[in-house]
Image: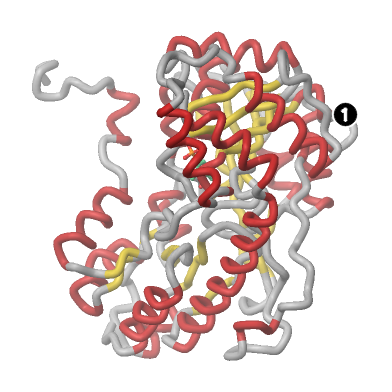
Amino acid sequence: MSSMTEPLVRRLRPFTSTIFAEMSALAVSTGAINLGQGFPDTDGPASMLAAAQQAIADGANQYPPGPGIPELRQAIAEARLADYGQRFNPDTEVLVTVGATEAIAAAVLALIEPGDEVIVLEPFYDSYPAAVAMAHGVLVPVRLRPCGDPAIGRFALDPQALADAVTDRTRLILLNSPHNPTGTVLTHAELAAVAAVAIDRDLIVVTDEVYEYLTFADGDAAGPGTGDGAADGARPVPHLPIGTLPGMAERTLTVSSAGKSFNVTGWKIGWVCGPAPLVAAVRAVKQFLTFVGGAPFQPAVAGALRTEREWVGGLRKSLQDKRDRLCDGLTAAGFEVVRPQGTYFVVADIRPMLRRAGSAADTDGLTFCRTLPDRCGVVAVPQQVFYADPAAGAHFVRFAFCKRDEVIDEAVRRLAGSSV
Ligand SMILES: *Cc1c(COP(=O)(O)O)cnc(C)c1O
Protein backbone atom coordinates (compact mmCIF):
# COMPACT_ATOMS: atom_id res chain seq x y z
CA MET A 1 0.00 0.00 0.00
CA SER A 2 1.25 3.49 -0.82
CA SER A 3 2.60 5.57 2.02
CA MET A 4 0.13 8.29 1.02
CA THR A 5 -3.04 6.21 1.34
CA GLU A 6 -1.91 4.54 4.57
CA PRO A 7 0.60 6.99 6.05
CA LEU A 8 0.23 6.02 9.71
CA VAL A 9 2.89 3.61 10.98
CA ARG A 10 1.63 0.08 11.38
CA ARG A 11 1.90 -0.15 15.15
CA LEU A 12 -0.40 2.86 15.64
CA ARG A 13 -3.11 1.90 13.13
CA PRO A 14 -5.30 0.30 15.79
CA PHE A 15 -5.51 3.72 17.43
CA THR A 16 -6.83 5.89 14.60
CA SER A 17 -10.21 6.60 16.13
CA THR A 18 -11.47 6.34 19.66
CA ILE A 19 -14.79 4.99 20.79
CA PHE A 20 -15.32 8.27 22.69
CA ALA A 21 -15.15 10.29 19.46
CA GLU A 22 -17.64 7.93 17.77
CA MET A 23 -20.08 7.94 20.68
CA SER A 24 -19.82 11.69 21.33
CA ALA A 25 -20.48 12.32 17.62
CA LEU A 26 -23.53 10.06 17.90
CA ALA A 27 -24.71 12.05 20.92
CA VAL A 28 -24.49 15.26 18.89
CA SER A 29 -26.14 13.89 15.74
CA THR A 30 -29.03 12.28 17.64
CA GLY A 31 -29.37 14.86 20.42
CA ALA A 32 -28.93 12.07 22.96
CA ILE A 33 -27.80 12.53 26.58
CA ASN A 34 -24.08 11.80 26.66
CA LEU A 35 -23.19 9.51 29.54
CA GLY A 36 -20.28 8.29 27.46
CA GLN A 37 -17.27 10.52 27.87
CA GLY A 38 -16.31 11.28 31.47
CA PHE A 39 -16.27 15.00 31.87
CA PRO A 40 -18.27 16.97 34.47
CA ASP A 41 -20.96 19.42 33.40
CA THR A 42 -20.34 21.83 36.27
CA ASP A 43 -17.35 24.08 37.03
CA GLY A 44 -14.51 23.77 39.50
CA PRO A 45 -14.00 25.97 42.59
CA ALA A 46 -14.63 29.67 41.82
CA SER A 47 -11.41 30.82 43.55
CA MET A 48 -9.38 28.55 41.28
CA LEU A 49 -11.09 29.79 38.11
CA ALA A 50 -10.54 33.39 39.21
CA ALA A 51 -6.88 32.68 39.98
CA ALA A 52 -6.29 31.44 36.42
CA GLN A 53 -7.95 34.56 34.98
CA GLN A 54 -5.87 36.74 37.29
CA ALA A 55 -2.70 34.90 36.27
CA ILE A 56 -3.40 35.74 32.62
CA ALA A 57 -4.04 39.37 33.55
CA ASP A 58 -0.80 39.37 35.55
CA GLY A 59 1.21 38.16 32.57
CA ALA A 60 1.79 34.47 33.34
CA ASN A 61 1.62 33.82 29.61
CA GLN A 62 5.10 32.67 28.63
CA TYR A 63 6.94 29.36 29.07
CA PRO A 64 6.93 28.34 32.71
CA PRO A 65 10.00 26.49 34.09
CA GLY A 66 10.51 23.02 32.56
CA PRO A 67 9.60 21.01 35.67
CA GLY A 68 6.60 23.26 36.47
CA ILE A 69 6.41 26.40 38.59
CA PRO A 70 8.01 25.95 42.06
CA GLU A 71 4.80 26.99 43.83
CA LEU A 72 2.85 24.14 42.19
CA ARG A 73 5.55 21.53 42.78
CA GLN A 74 5.62 22.63 46.44
CA ALA A 75 1.82 22.38 46.72
CA ILE A 76 1.85 18.88 45.16
CA ALA A 77 4.55 17.71 47.59
CA GLU A 78 2.62 19.18 50.54
CA ALA A 79 -0.60 17.46 49.46
CA ARG A 80 1.06 14.04 49.09
CA LEU A 81 2.60 14.45 52.54
CA ALA A 82 -0.62 15.60 54.20
CA ASP A 83 -2.81 12.98 52.54
CA TYR A 84 -0.60 9.90 52.52
CA GLY A 85 2.63 10.66 54.40
CA GLN A 86 4.61 10.46 51.14
CA ARG A 87 7.73 12.68 51.08
CA PHE A 88 8.81 14.15 47.76
CA ASN A 89 11.47 16.82 47.20
CA PRO A 90 9.63 19.40 45.05
CA ASP A 91 12.84 20.25 43.18
CA THR A 92 13.88 16.78 42.08
CA GLU A 93 10.99 14.41 42.74
CA VAL A 94 7.96 16.27 41.32
CA LEU A 95 7.37 17.02 37.64
CA VAL A 96 4.39 18.96 36.27
CA THR A 97 3.04 17.52 33.00
CA VAL A 98 0.34 18.23 30.40
CA GLY A 99 -2.25 16.15 32.20
CA ALA A 100 -1.81 12.65 33.55
CA THR A 101 -1.90 11.49 29.94
CA GLU A 102 1.47 13.06 29.17
CA ALA A 103 2.96 11.83 32.43
CA ILE A 104 2.00 8.24 31.54
CA ALA A 105 3.14 8.47 27.92
CA ALA A 106 6.45 10.09 28.89
CA ALA A 107 7.03 7.49 31.62
CA VAL A 108 6.42 4.59 29.23
CA LEU A 109 8.60 6.17 26.52
CA ALA A 110 11.34 6.85 29.06
CA LEU A 111 11.40 3.50 30.79
CA ILE A 112 10.90 0.67 28.30
CA GLU A 113 13.06 -0.67 25.50
CA PRO A 114 11.48 -2.00 22.29
CA GLY A 115 9.92 -5.39 23.02
CA ASP A 116 9.65 -4.82 26.77
CA GLU A 117 6.36 -5.88 28.33
CA VAL A 118 4.03 -3.59 30.28
CA ILE A 119 1.41 -5.12 32.54
CA VAL A 120 -1.90 -3.25 32.72
CA LEU A 121 -5.18 -3.93 34.48
CA GLU A 122 -7.94 -4.94 32.04
CA PRO A 123 -10.26 -3.27 31.11
CA PHE A 124 -7.65 -0.58 30.54
CA TYR A 125 -7.74 3.19 30.05
CA ASP A 126 -7.52 3.88 26.32
CA SER A 127 -4.26 5.83 26.38
CA TYR A 128 -2.26 2.94 27.90
CA PRO A 129 -2.10 0.61 24.89
CA ALA A 130 -1.39 3.57 22.60
CA ALA A 131 1.50 4.76 24.82
CA VAL A 132 2.92 1.25 24.95
CA ALA A 133 2.64 0.95 21.15
CA MET A 134 4.39 4.31 20.66
CA ALA A 135 7.26 2.97 22.74
CA HIS A 136 7.38 -0.30 20.72
CA GLY A 137 6.40 -2.16 23.87
CA VAL A 138 4.10 -5.13 24.39
CA LEU A 139 0.87 -4.76 26.36
CA VAL A 140 0.14 -7.59 28.81
CA PRO A 141 -3.35 -7.33 30.33
CA VAL A 142 -4.33 -8.76 33.71
CA ARG A 143 -8.09 -8.92 33.99
CA LEU A 144 -10.15 -7.54 36.86
CA ARG A 145 -13.14 -9.83 37.40
CA PRO A 146 -16.49 -9.18 39.05
CA CYS A 147 -16.79 -11.03 42.33
CA GLY A 148 -19.56 -11.21 44.90
CA ASP A 149 -23.16 -10.14 44.62
CA PRO A 150 -23.31 -7.44 41.92
CA ALA A 151 -25.08 -5.02 44.25
CA ILE A 152 -22.32 -5.19 46.84
CA GLY A 153 -19.47 -6.82 44.93
CA ARG A 154 -16.56 -5.35 43.02
CA PHE A 155 -14.14 -6.11 40.21
CA ALA A 156 -11.18 -7.75 41.93
CA LEU A 157 -7.53 -8.37 41.06
CA ASP A 158 -6.33 -11.98 41.07
CA PRO A 159 -2.78 -11.85 42.51
CA GLN A 160 -1.88 -15.18 40.92
CA ALA A 161 -2.92 -13.92 37.47
CA LEU A 162 -0.64 -10.93 38.00
CA ALA A 163 2.30 -13.07 39.11
CA ASP A 164 1.75 -15.40 36.14
CA ALA A 165 1.79 -12.48 33.69
CA VAL A 166 5.37 -11.51 34.54
CA THR A 167 8.10 -12.72 32.17
CA ASP A 168 11.78 -11.93 31.68
CA ARG A 169 10.71 -9.11 29.36
CA THR A 170 8.41 -7.40 31.88
CA ARG A 171 9.66 -3.94 32.77
CA LEU A 172 6.67 -2.00 34.08
CA ILE A 173 3.40 -2.48 35.87
CA LEU A 174 1.02 0.32 34.91
CA LEU A 175 -1.52 0.43 37.70
CA ASN A 176 -4.73 2.45 37.99
CA SER A 177 -6.60 2.87 41.28
CA PRO A 178 -9.29 4.07 41.74
CA HIS A 179 -9.84 2.20 38.49
CA ASN A 180 -11.52 3.50 35.35
CA PRO A 181 -13.93 2.03 34.25
CA THR A 182 -14.75 -0.55 36.97
CA GLY A 183 -14.67 1.85 39.93
CA THR A 184 -12.53 -0.59 41.90
CA VAL A 185 -10.32 0.86 44.62
CA LEU A 186 -7.53 -1.66 45.07
CA THR A 187 -7.38 -3.04 48.62
CA HIS A 188 -4.30 -3.20 50.81
CA ALA A 189 -4.08 -6.94 50.11
CA GLU A 190 -4.27 -6.44 46.33
CA LEU A 191 -1.67 -3.67 46.42
CA ALA A 192 0.59 -5.75 48.66
CA ALA A 193 0.41 -8.56 46.11
CA VAL A 194 1.38 -6.15 43.31
CA ALA A 195 4.21 -4.80 45.46
CA ALA A 196 5.50 -8.29 46.21
CA VAL A 197 5.65 -9.11 42.48
CA ALA A 198 7.30 -5.76 41.65
CA ILE A 199 9.96 -6.20 44.31
CA ASP A 200 10.56 -9.87 43.56
CA ARG A 201 10.94 -9.26 39.80
CA ASP A 202 12.58 -5.83 40.13
CA LEU A 203 9.87 -3.95 38.21
CA ILE A 204 8.95 -0.28 38.11
CA VAL A 205 5.35 0.59 38.97
CA VAL A 206 3.64 3.57 37.36
CA THR A 207 0.41 4.25 39.24
CA ASP A 208 -2.36 6.39 37.75
CA GLU A 209 -4.22 7.94 40.70
CA VAL A 210 -6.23 10.67 38.96
CA TYR A 211 -9.33 9.65 40.95
CA GLU A 212 -7.43 9.65 44.26
CA TYR A 213 -9.97 11.91 45.99
CA LEU A 214 -13.08 10.47 44.34
CA THR A 215 -13.82 7.38 46.43
CA PHE A 216 -17.17 6.52 48.01
CA ALA A 217 -18.68 4.61 50.86
CA ASP A 218 -19.05 0.97 49.91
CA GLY A 219 -22.32 -0.57 48.80
CA ASP A 220 -25.79 0.70 49.47
CA ALA A 221 -26.39 0.07 53.16
CA ALA A 222 -30.17 0.48 53.13
CA GLY A 223 -30.66 -1.84 50.19
CA PRO A 224 -31.65 -1.21 46.59
CA GLY A 225 -33.95 1.62 45.67
CA THR A 226 -33.04 3.91 48.54
CA GLY A 227 -29.65 4.89 47.22
CA ASP A 228 -29.61 8.57 47.96
CA GLY A 229 -28.52 9.12 51.49
CA ALA A 230 -28.28 5.44 52.37
CA ALA A 231 -24.53 5.49 52.84
CA ASP A 232 -24.42 9.01 54.29
CA GLY A 233 -22.74 8.12 57.54
CA ALA A 234 -20.36 5.55 56.11
CA ARG A 235 -16.77 6.50 55.41
CA PRO A 236 -15.46 6.46 51.87
CA VAL A 237 -13.28 3.52 50.87
CA PRO A 238 -9.73 4.74 51.51
CA HIS A 239 -7.42 5.29 48.54
CA LEU A 240 -4.02 3.80 49.28
CA PRO A 241 -1.10 4.82 47.04
CA ILE A 242 1.07 1.79 46.27
CA GLY A 243 4.12 4.03 46.70
CA THR A 244 3.48 4.02 50.46
CA LEU A 245 3.97 0.25 50.80
CA PRO A 246 7.31 -1.00 52.16
CA GLY A 247 10.01 -1.20 49.48
CA MET A 248 7.85 0.60 46.90
CA ALA A 249 8.86 4.28 47.16
CA GLU A 250 12.12 3.67 45.29
CA ARG A 251 10.40 1.91 42.35
CA THR A 252 7.11 3.81 42.02
CA LEU A 253 6.11 6.76 39.86
CA THR A 254 2.84 8.24 41.12
CA VAL A 255 0.72 10.10 38.58
CA SER A 256 -2.21 12.40 39.28
CA SER A 257 -3.91 15.44 37.81
CA ALA A 258 -6.06 18.46 38.56
CA GLY A 259 -8.62 17.52 35.91
CA LYS A 260 -10.69 15.03 37.91
CA SER A 261 -10.04 16.47 41.39
CA PHE A 262 -11.16 20.01 40.51
CA ASN A 263 -13.58 19.54 37.57
CA VAL A 264 -11.14 21.02 35.06
CA THR A 265 -10.53 18.21 32.58
CA GLY A 266 -9.75 20.82 29.92
CA TRP A 267 -6.85 22.40 31.81
CA LYS A 268 -4.52 19.43 31.43
CA ILE A 269 -2.36 20.07 34.47
CA GLY A 270 -0.97 16.76 35.72
CA TRP A 271 2.07 15.60 37.65
CA VAL A 272 4.32 12.70 38.38
CA CYS A 273 6.15 12.12 41.67
CA GLY A 274 8.84 9.57 42.49
CA PRO A 275 12.50 8.99 43.14
CA ALA A 276 14.77 11.56 41.45
CA PRO A 277 16.35 9.20 38.86
CA LEU A 278 12.94 8.00 37.63
CA VAL A 279 11.50 11.53 37.54
CA ALA A 280 14.61 12.75 35.67
CA ALA A 281 14.05 10.02 33.07
CA VAL A 282 10.44 11.12 32.55
CA ARG A 283 11.53 14.77 32.39
CA ALA A 284 14.03 13.94 29.63
CA VAL A 285 11.16 12.73 27.43
CA LYS A 286 8.60 15.29 28.57
CA GLN A 287 10.77 18.23 27.59
CA PHE A 288 10.66 17.10 23.95
CA LEU A 289 7.00 16.11 23.88
CA THR A 290 5.55 19.41 25.07
CA PHE A 291 8.43 21.13 26.96
CA VAL A 292 5.94 22.83 29.30
CA GLY A 293 2.23 23.55 29.52
CA GLY A 294 -0.54 25.61 31.05
CA ALA A 295 1.36 28.59 32.50
CA PRO A 296 -1.68 30.45 33.90
CA PHE A 297 -3.30 27.26 35.16
CA GLN A 298 -0.32 26.22 37.25
CA PRO A 299 -0.63 28.90 39.98
CA ALA A 300 -4.39 28.36 40.06
CA VAL A 301 -3.99 24.62 40.67
CA ALA A 302 -1.32 25.31 43.32
CA GLY A 303 -3.81 27.52 45.15
CA ALA A 304 -6.61 24.98 44.85
CA LEU A 305 -4.44 22.18 46.25
CA ARG A 306 -3.80 24.40 49.28
CA THR A 307 -7.18 25.97 49.90
CA GLU A 308 -9.95 24.03 48.16
CA ARG A 309 -9.79 20.69 49.95
CA GLU A 310 -13.25 21.23 51.36
CA TRP A 311 -14.60 21.79 47.86
CA VAL A 312 -13.09 18.45 46.81
CA GLY A 313 -14.81 16.83 49.81
CA GLY A 314 -18.11 18.24 48.56
CA LEU A 315 -17.40 16.93 45.06
CA ARG A 316 -16.75 13.48 46.49
CA LYS A 317 -20.01 13.52 48.41
CA SER A 318 -22.04 14.75 45.46
CA LEU A 319 -20.50 12.11 43.17
CA GLN A 320 -21.37 9.42 45.71
CA ASP A 321 -25.00 10.52 45.58
CA LYS A 322 -24.87 10.57 41.78
CA ARG A 323 -23.38 7.08 41.76
CA ASP A 324 -26.32 5.81 43.79
CA ARG A 325 -28.80 7.75 41.68
CA LEU A 326 -27.49 6.23 38.45
CA CYS A 327 -26.92 2.71 39.84
CA ASP A 328 -30.45 2.53 41.25
CA GLY A 329 -31.87 3.83 37.97
CA LEU A 330 -29.89 1.38 35.86
CA THR A 331 -30.91 -1.50 38.10
CA ALA A 332 -34.57 -0.49 37.82
CA ALA A 333 -34.15 -0.32 34.04
CA GLY A 334 -32.96 -3.93 33.96
CA PHE A 335 -29.17 -3.64 33.92
CA GLU A 336 -26.99 -5.47 36.39
CA VAL A 337 -24.49 -3.03 37.87
CA VAL A 338 -21.46 -3.41 40.08
CA ARG A 339 -21.62 -0.40 42.38
CA PRO A 340 -18.29 1.43 41.97
CA GLN A 341 -16.11 2.41 44.95
CA GLY A 342 -14.67 5.41 43.13
CA THR A 343 -14.27 7.37 39.85
CA TYR A 344 -16.93 8.84 37.56
CA PHE A 345 -18.14 5.54 36.12
CA VAL A 346 -20.34 2.53 36.53
CA VAL A 347 -20.02 -0.64 34.47
CA ALA A 348 -23.34 -2.28 33.62
CA ASP A 349 -23.96 -5.81 32.37
CA ILE A 350 -26.51 -5.68 29.53
CA ARG A 351 -27.34 -9.41 29.51
CA PRO A 352 -30.19 -9.44 32.06
CA MET A 353 -31.91 -6.65 30.16
CA LEU A 354 -31.48 -8.41 26.83
CA ARG A 355 -32.83 -11.66 28.29
CA ARG A 356 -35.82 -9.88 29.73
CA ALA A 357 -36.58 -8.27 26.39
CA GLY A 358 -36.11 -11.57 24.56
CA SER A 359 -33.45 -9.99 22.34
CA ALA A 360 -30.86 -11.83 20.31
CA ALA A 361 -28.52 -13.39 22.83
CA ASP A 362 -25.51 -12.42 20.77
CA THR A 363 -26.20 -8.68 20.92
CA ASP A 364 -22.96 -7.23 22.18
CA GLY A 365 -22.11 -3.95 23.90
CA LEU A 366 -20.89 -2.30 20.71
CA THR A 367 -24.14 -2.96 18.84
CA PHE A 368 -26.10 -2.06 21.94
CA CYS A 369 -24.33 1.31 22.32
CA ARG A 370 -24.48 2.13 18.61
CA THR A 371 -28.26 1.72 18.60
CA LEU A 372 -29.02 3.06 22.09
CA PRO A 373 -29.14 6.76 21.07
CA ASP A 374 -31.80 6.04 18.44
CA ARG A 375 -33.74 3.71 20.67
CA CYS A 376 -33.88 5.93 23.72
CA GLY A 377 -31.66 8.99 23.45
CA VAL A 378 -28.79 7.96 25.73
CA VAL A 379 -25.11 7.41 24.95
CA ALA A 380 -22.95 4.87 26.79
CA VAL A 381 -19.54 3.41 25.95
CA PRO A 382 -19.05 -0.29 25.09
CA GLN A 383 -16.29 -1.87 27.14
CA GLN A 384 -15.06 -4.53 24.73
CA VAL A 385 -12.70 -2.00 23.15
CA PHE A 386 -10.85 -1.84 26.48
CA TYR A 387 -10.15 -5.58 26.52
CA ALA A 388 -7.37 -7.33 24.59
CA ASP A 389 -9.94 -10.09 23.96
CA PRO A 390 -13.14 -8.20 23.03
CA ALA A 391 -15.32 -11.23 23.85
CA ALA A 392 -14.36 -10.89 27.51
CA GLY A 393 -15.93 -7.43 27.75
CA ALA A 394 -18.70 -7.82 25.18
CA HIS A 395 -21.55 -7.65 27.68
CA PHE A 396 -20.32 -4.60 29.59
CA VAL A 397 -21.14 -0.96 28.87
CA ARG A 398 -19.97 2.07 30.85
CA PHE A 399 -22.06 5.01 31.99
CA ALA A 400 -20.64 8.25 33.49
CA PHE A 401 -22.37 9.85 36.46
CA CYS A 402 -20.33 13.08 36.70
CA LYS A 403 -23.41 14.93 35.42
CA ARG A 404 -26.10 17.15 36.92
CA ASP A 405 -28.80 15.25 38.80
CA GLU A 406 -31.52 16.25 36.33
CA VAL A 407 -29.42 14.90 33.45
CA ILE A 408 -28.96 11.55 35.24
CA ASP A 409 -32.67 11.39 36.09
CA GLU A 410 -33.73 12.06 32.50
CA ALA A 411 -31.26 9.46 31.16
CA VAL A 412 -32.59 6.86 33.61
CA ARG A 413 -36.18 7.71 32.69
CA ARG A 414 -35.38 7.19 29.01
CA LEU A 415 -33.52 3.92 29.66
CA ALA A 416 -36.42 2.53 31.71
CA GLY A 417 -38.81 3.27 28.86
CA SER A 418 -36.59 1.91 26.10
CA SER A 419 -37.24 -1.22 24.14
CA VAL A 420 -34.11 -3.26 23.58
C1 LIG B 1 -9.20 11.07 32.77
C2 LIG B 1 -8.12 10.08 32.99
C3 LIG B 1 -6.77 10.39 32.69
C4 LIG B 1 -6.38 11.66 31.98
O1 LIG B 1 -6.01 12.66 32.82
P1 LIG B 1 -5.59 14.08 32.20
O2 LIG B 1 -5.04 14.79 33.36
O3 LIG B 1 -6.80 14.70 31.60
O4 LIG B 1 -4.55 13.80 31.15
C5 LIG B 1 -5.80 9.45 32.99
N1 LIG B 1 -6.13 8.27 33.53
C6 LIG B 1 -7.40 7.92 33.80
C7 LIG B 1 -7.69 6.59 34.39
C8 LIG B 1 -8.43 8.82 33.53
O5 LIG B 1 -9.71 8.46 33.74
Q: Is residue 324 above or below residue 365?
A: below
Q: Is residue 52 above or below residue 379?
A: above
Percent across and percent down for residue 2 are 10, 17
Q: In the picture, residue 145 is in which quadrant?
A: bottom right
Identified at 47% across, 72% down, the residue is: 349
Question: Badge 1: how crowded within 10 Å, few (<14), some, or many (20+)?
Answer: some
Percent across and percent down for residue 188 are 83, 51
Is 379 situated left or right of 38 in this image?
left
Identified at 47% across, 58% down, the residue is: 392
- Number of numbered callouts drawn: 1
Which SS class for mark 1?
loop
Identified at 57% across, 17% down, the residue is: 112
Instruction: Tell me, yes or no, if residue 161 can be seen here.
Output: yes
- Quadrant where the C terminus sits is bottom left
Q: Is mark 1 within 8 Å of ligand 1?
A: no
Scheme by which the image is coloured: secondary structure
Task: Please state which of residues 86 and 191 is positioned toward the viewer in this rendering.
Answer: 86
- Disc 1: which residue: 247
Is 332 situated left or right of 145 in this image?
left
- Quadrant where the N terminus sits is top left
Percent across and percent down for residue 65 are 54, 12
Task: Please state which of residues 391 and 218 is positioned toward the viewer in this rendering.
Answer: 218
Task: Please state which of residues 420 and 312 is positioned toward the viewer in this rendering.
Answer: 312
The amino acid type, in three-letter code, at marker 1 is Gly
Task: Please state which of residues 163 and 238 is positioned toward the viewer in this rendering.
Answer: 238
